[in-house]
Image (cartoon, rainbow, N blue to C red):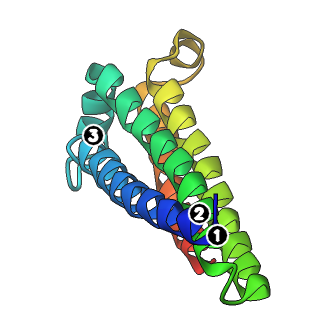
Amino acid sequence: MTQQQDQWRAGRLAGAMYLLQMSTAIAGFAIRQSFGVSGDPAATARNISEGERLYRLSIAVDLATVCAVVVLTWSCYVLLKPVDRNLALLAALFRMLENAVLAGIGVMLLISLGLLVSPEYLKAFDAGQLQSLSRLFRSGHAQGFAIGFIF
């Protein structure tokens, strides 16, 4: 296979992965937004508890986004390497750092959910405490986006 054929394939793959990662990122965000009740953390917590499967789906969709970004980053590197290898490598490094942060903050959503539905926590804390802790982890997830986007 020639370098030009590699470039064409990488370009098509980059385009497909870009569309996939944008659509999954938007879908995950939109699903989670549907649980929120402005100014009422207790109602938000109740919505998350009652819609646990859908909330978990939003987290899985976020993980699909992370996977798509890995492939997108690799294909962009292949595309840009002939132009300037060092700059393409630097861009890939920064994108992977961003992706690692965004993947890591997904754990905060799982903790947030666990606080609301796990029997161990439900016995140890009262409902208001659990709702506040869950809100704290969801807030940490939102702040993690700002850190990830620095890269």
- Name the residue rendered at 52%, 28% in the picture: 115
Question: What is the secondary structure assignment of the residue under circle 1?
Answer: helix
Could you say where residue 135 lies in the image, as x and y percent from the top left? 44, 46
> Given contact means CB atoms under 8 Å apart, are the residues at marks 2 and 3 in contact?
no
Compared with 139, 54 (above or below) is above
Could you say where residue 92 lies in the image, as x and y percent from the top left? 68, 71
Compared with 82, 19 (above or below) is above
125 vs 14, left or right, is: right
- Name the residue rendered at 55%, 12% in the picture: 123
Q: Which residue is mark 1?
A: 3
Question: What is the secondary structure assignment of the residue under circle 2?
Answer: helix
56 vs 91, left or right, is: left
Mark number displayed over residue 6: 2
Mark number displayed over residue 103: none
Q: Nearer the viewer, mark 2 or mark 3?
A: 2
Q: Nearer the viewer, mark 3 or mark 1?
A: 1
> Which quadrant of the structure image shows residue 116?
top left
Q: Amino acid at mark 2?
A: Asp
> Given contact means CB atoms under 8 Å apart, are the residues at marks 2 and 1 in contact?
yes
> Which quadrant of the structure image shows residue 59?
top left
Question: What is the secondary structure assignment of the residue under circle 3?
Answer: helix
Q: Which residue is mark 3?
A: 44
Q: Amino acid at mark 1?
A: Gln
Could you give the CA–CA distance between mark 2 and mark 1, rounded to whole angstroms? 5 Å
Compared with 68, 11 (above or below) is below
Q: Considering depth in this image, is 15 or 56 the residue closer to the camera? A: 15
> Which quadrant of the structure image shows residue 61?
top left
Q: Amino acid at mark 3?
A: Thr
Neighbour tally class for label 2: few under 14, some 14-19, many 20 plus, Cα within 10 Å: some
- Name the residue rendered at 30%, 44% in the picture: 32
